[in-house]
Every structure is written in structure tokens, then in C-alpha cells.
Amino acid sequence: SCLWFSSMWVAALPASLAAVVLFYLSDRQQRWLDQTLPGVARLLALLLALAGAALWVMALGLGVGLMVALWLLTLPALLMALFAGHHRDTFQKVSGKMGRNP
């Protein structure tokens, strides 16, 4: 049982996190890349998110598995957007004064 859970966890976590990254980078308002990823990246992200959720449900049961899957989609997506915004829009030294980075 413990080996079954660990093998599910090892597959579910990367699938969930890869889905988040692909969803973010394929959004037209993403701030990490100069150009967004093509639309097929969103389809791949959706498939990875569904696979990750299914693996979490198989490993942890329906209630806990869905909650873990949703948190692993929501929290990293929020953090990626916050870090990208902070890195891109942070106050930086401009001409000896503190100002917004253009």
C-alpha cells in the first residue's frame, strides 16, 4: 500500500506542476516569455491536470485526492503569477532615484 501511494505521488506531482506551468505560459497575459506558447500547450496542460487529479484520487481517495489536486493547481499558479509580476514590475533604481521599471 505504501509503495503504491509513493509511485502515484511520484507521477501525480510532476503532472500537476507541469500542467500549471503550461497553463501559465500559454496564457496571453503571462510575463515570463516574450511570446506565449501555442494553443496545443493548453490542451496538453488540461490533459496533465486531469491525469494528475486522477492519480491523486487513486492514491488518496476521492475527497482528499481532489482537494490535493486542486490545491496543487491553484497555489503554484498563484505563486507563479505573483513572482512574475514582482520580478517584472518591482521598484528598481532608475537614474539614482527609486522609480517604477518601465
Image (cartoon, rainbow, N blue to C red):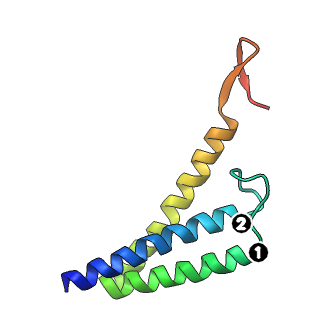
**Residue at horizontal 44 percent and vertical 86 percent from the top:** 54
Q: Are marks 1 and 2 in contact (CB under 8 Å)?
A: yes
Residue 67 makes an appearance in the image: no
Q: Nearer the viewer, residue 16 or 34?
A: 34
- Locate the N terminus and report the quarter of the image it occupies: bottom left
Looking at the image, residue 88 lies above or below residue 13: above
Kind of residue indicated by mark 2? Ser
Residue closest to the far top:
96
Horizontal placement of 25 versus 8: left or right?
A: right
Residue at coordinates 28% horizontally, 77% vertically from top-left?
Answer: 6
In the displayed structure, would residue 67 be above or below residue 55? above
Q: Quadrant of the C terminus?
A: top right
Amino acid identity at mark 1: Gly
* Residue 68 coordinates in the image, percent (x, y): 39, 72
What label does residue 26 carry, if any? 2
Residue at image coords 57%, 53%:
80
The residue lying furthest to the left in this view is 1
Q: Nearer the viewer, residue 15 or 50?
A: 15
Closer to the chain start, of discs 1 and 2, is: 2
Q: How many marks?
A: 2
Q: Point out residue 26 in the picture as x, y percentages from the top left corner.
A: 71, 66
Could you tell whether 44 is left or right of 28 in the image? left
Q: To which quarter of the image does residue 35 belong?
A: bottom right
Other-residue count near label 2 (Cα within 10 Å), few / some / many at <14 / 14–19 / ≥20: many
* Residue with the mark numbered 1: 39
Query: Residue 87: x percent and y percent?
Result: 63, 39
Residue 36, quarter of the rendered image: bottom right
Check disc 1: other Cα within 10 Å, few if <14, some if 14-19, many if 20+: few
Which residue is depicted at the point 53% across and 53% down? 79
Q: In this rendering, is residue 50 above or below 67?
A: below
